[in-house]
Amino acid sequence: LECIHITAVGSYTPQFTLTNDELANRVDTSDEWIRSHTGIRKRHIAGTEETCSDMAVKAVENMIETCNVDIAKIDGIVVATATPDFIGFPSTGCLVQQKLHLKTFPAFDVSAGCTGFIYALETARGMIATGTMHRVLVIGAEKLSSIVDWDDRNTCVLFGDGAGCVLLEQTEESGGILDCTLGAEGSGSAALAVTGEKNAICMDGRAVYAFAVQVIGETIKKLLSDNNLSIEDIDWIVPHQANERIISACAKRFSLPQEKFFLNIASYANTSAASIPIALSEMVEKNLLKTGDKVILIGFGAGLTYGGTLLTW
Ligand code: ACO
């Protein structure tokens, strides 16, 4: 299973941004409250006509441009999303395939809330290992603005839109994805759900917070101990970007160095399944990831689900 690598990354966020002050004109909140409780300063919001698959395609185009990828060699697309273009079908993966003018290979969606990207990456890795696919686009794309109740201050301040993608393939190089652990606690499904009269995000913030702090820490510890590594061996932890305070609380409780966690939530808010590939893309752009770096990706969210991937960059 080794030698399956992320060989390219890309991302896209809509041009339009909504600041905390602008949100405070609509609901009873403030820049001070949002920043101090979440670390968020602004979020990108898609236009009404712009769909999840549109954003996914733009992330792939960004990857093609910046990483010199030959798109014709792609033979699989896995899209992690909770906000597909269509409820039911066709899948966003098939729409992305169509919009990229590609043909015949498998394309589908994975639904695991904010852990979606970790689930999708592991699905693609397994299918590469069995030979079903060889060069796979793994995409996280979300138009959360379409399922946010813009009158609910408890949730509307937290989310944003965007997409990120990686190319996953087997190469001659050693390393790549070394291990993955996935989990779900379906008994907690009501804590974070798209429901109610408005069919919008409803959340028990404190329950999600407590769950997140615990599973992030436990997932990191499990990946370290299963692979005979210590936290000193890890160069970066790239968590799902839900709330800066979740990360601080987790670092404190599990004695993890907070400076190893990459955070960019200030600019994007929570983009659910898109947040990890957007973060990876930004890290590559800023030259933060060096060949050979050991990296842990951590997802957690609706389901309730969680998962972590250990890899050598
Ligand atoms: N502005 C001002 N006040 C607010 C706001 C707001 N935007 N939102 C809530 N408040 C108020 C509440 O009404 C409450 O007031 P009350 O005490 O008078 O009732 C007060 O602030 C404190 O509320 P808490 O819920 O205790 O606030 P807390 O400090 O826990 O922060 C938060 C809330 C940020 C939502 C936190 O619980 C959290 O981050 N939870 C995790 C959320 C998360 O990550 N969700 C996404 C998971 S990923 C996915 O799958 C989508």
Image: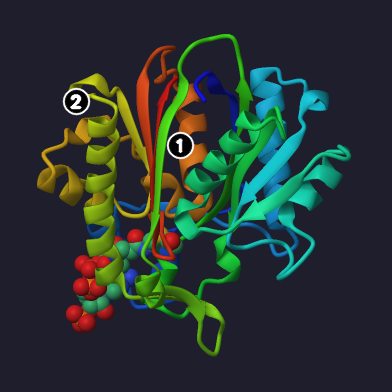
Image coordinates of residue 176 in percent, x first then y, are 48, 21
Image coordinates of residue 186 in percent, x first then y, are 40, 69
> Which residue sits at x=52%, y=77%?
200
Q: Is residue 120 left or right of residue 19?
A: right
- Please tell me whether mark 1 or mark 2 is closer to you in this view: 2
> Which residue sits at x=71%, y=41%?
77
Which residue bears the numbered disc 2? Answer: 230
Find the distance from the CA under tag 1 to the CA under tag 2.
Answer: 23 Å
Callout 1–callout 2 Cβ contact below 8 Å? no
Find numbered disc 1 in the image and state the secondary structure of the residue it sits on: helix
In the picture, the quarter occupied by the C terminus is top left
Tag on residue 239?
none
Q: How many marks?
A: 2
Looking at the picture, which amino acid does disc 2 mark? Answer: Ser
Q: Is residue 271 visible?
A: no
Looking at the picture, which amino acid does disc 1 mark? Answer: Ala
* Foreground pick, 240 / 229: 229
Find numbered disc 2 in the image and state the secondary structure of the residue it sits on: loop
Q: Residue furthest front?
A: 130
Q: Earlier in the sequence, mark 1 or mark 2?
A: 2
Which residue bears the numbered disc 1? Answer: 279
Image coordinates of residue 67 in percent, x first then y, are 64, 20
Quarter of the view holding residue 58: top right
Q: Is residue 137 left or right of residue 158?
A: right
